[in-house]
């Protein structure tokens, strides 16, 4: 990607999106979207917090949480080591390249034909899912900083899933159990979007919903996330030190559509690099996911099939109808 990004105003045609997707025609030119902001400082079972999470998840599928108790230092260290990795030479980064013969997505790669972005995938939880072969050794504290962030995420995930569960009228732990309990996989992806000579014509990542349960995202200071709402694409204005929450497909399925997986995309910048750190919370591959029986009745029939998460992911990634 870095060689392409250095081109002076010349854009290879494979990056140009159809006009119906190009930011110059599709980005709303007024104010940024007023995405819900949820104060996470209250008790996990407080009526105010549960209601705020329920409304944001059912009406938007996207919200930002503040007062989440992950320190600015922990987040800054995560950002620093990720940024330093992508500043290495291409040869150094390719030492952690994905294995093309494996179904495992861990490692470094470029998806040139899909978007203006390089990326690094590292599973950071549970321990049995972690493959340190694909964790950079340069910078030397990449592992320490990344694992520290992962440890701090546990209390956020626990509280978030508890609120989502209570919002559906379930016991606090029911959604956590339904997405895998302690086997829930934390899949970190670092997205690196270099400057682009024609950001009005390309996308960093095209429109999609996340196939996981929920996504917890740390951005850098560069605008780039957009949400689809009322037939328009709106910029999402970041709040310093907030975490951005995306409801993913599996929570929509488990809730039988009460919670909405958010349709979103990424745009790029002409002058500066954008980086984001989403962690996708994924059920273990063997786990069957479908609408929770307690939410179903004569008036509320299942709207989704029940299937193994691995089968769902295969269909989605290969554009096969579910």
Image (tube, rainbow, N blue to C red):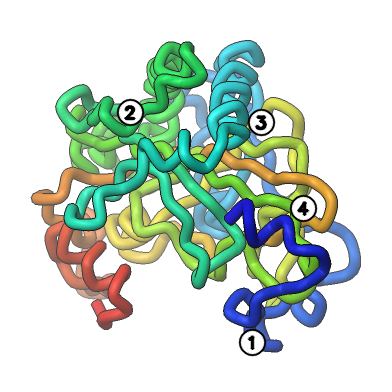
Residue at 24 percent across and 77 percent down: it is 322
- Mark 2 or mark 3: which is in front? 2
Classify residue 160 as left or right of residue 233: left
Q: Residue 21 or 55: which is nearer the viewer?
A: 21
For the residues labelled 4 and 3, the Cα–Cα distance comes to 14 Å
For the residues labelled 4 and 1, the Cα–Cα distance comes to 28 Å
Residue found at the very far front of the displayed protein: 91
Q: Earlier in the sequence, mark 4 or mark 1?
A: 1
Q: Which of marks 4 and 2 is nearer the N terminus?
A: 4
- Mark 4 or mark 1: which is in front? 1
Q: Which of marks 3 and 1 is nearer the N terminus?
A: 1
Q: Earlier in the sequence, mark 4 or mark 3?
A: 4
- Mark 4 or mark 2: which is in front? 2
Q: Disc 1, disc 2: CB below 8 Å?
A: no
Q: Which mark is residue 34?
A: 4
Query: Which residue is label 1 attached to?
Result: 18
Q: Position of residue 23 (x, y in %)?
A: 75, 73
Q: Which mark is residue 242?
A: 3
For the residues labelled 2 and 3, the Cα–Cα distance comes to 21 Å
Q: Which of marks 2 and 3 is nearer the N terminus?
A: 2
Q: Position of residue 214 (x, y in %)?
A: 41, 46
Q: Is mark 3 on a helix, strand or loop?
A: loop
Residue 10 visible, this angle? yes
């Amino acid at each position: 990607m870095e060689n392409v990004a250095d081109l002076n105003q010349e854009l290879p045609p494979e990056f140009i999106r159809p006009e119906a997707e190009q930011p110059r025609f599709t980005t709303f030119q007024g104010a940024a979207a007023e995405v819900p902001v949820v104060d996470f400082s209250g008790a996990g079972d407080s009526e105010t917090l549960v209601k705020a999470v329920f409304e944001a998840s059912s009406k938007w599928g996207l919200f930002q949480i503040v007062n989440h108790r992950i320190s600015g230092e922990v987040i800054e260290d995560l950002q620093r080591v990720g940024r330093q990795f992508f500043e290495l030479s291409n040869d150094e980064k390719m030492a952690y390249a994905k294995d093309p013969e494996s179904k495992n997505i861990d490692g470094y790669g470029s998806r040139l034909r899909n978007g203006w972005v390089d990326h690094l995938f590292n599973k950071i939880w549970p321990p049995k899912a972690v493959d340190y072969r694909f964790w950079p050794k340069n910078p030397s504290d990449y592992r320490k900083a990344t694992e520290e962030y992962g440890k701090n995420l546990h209390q956020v995930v626990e509280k978030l899933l508890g609120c989502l569960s209570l919002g559906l009228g379930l016991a606090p732990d029911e959604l956590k159990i339904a997405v895998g309990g302690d086997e829930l996989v934390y899949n970190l992806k670092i997205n690196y979007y270099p400057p682009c000579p024609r950001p009005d014509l390309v996308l960093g990542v095209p429109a999609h919903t996340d196939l996981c349960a929920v996504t917890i995202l740390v951005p850098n200071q560069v605008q780039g996330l957009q949400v689809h709402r009322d037939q328009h694409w709106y910029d999402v204005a970041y709040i310093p030190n907030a975490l951005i929450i995306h409801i993913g497909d599996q929570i929509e399925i488990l809730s039988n559509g009460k919670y909405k997986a958010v349709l979103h995309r990424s745009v790029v910048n002409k002058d500066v690099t954008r980086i984001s750190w989403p962690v996708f919370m994924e059920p273990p591959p063997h786990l069957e996911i479908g609408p929770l029986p307690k939410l179903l009745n004569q008036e509320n029939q299942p709207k989704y099939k029940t299937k193994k998460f691995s089968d769902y992911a295969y269909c989605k990634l290969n554009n096969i109808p579910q």
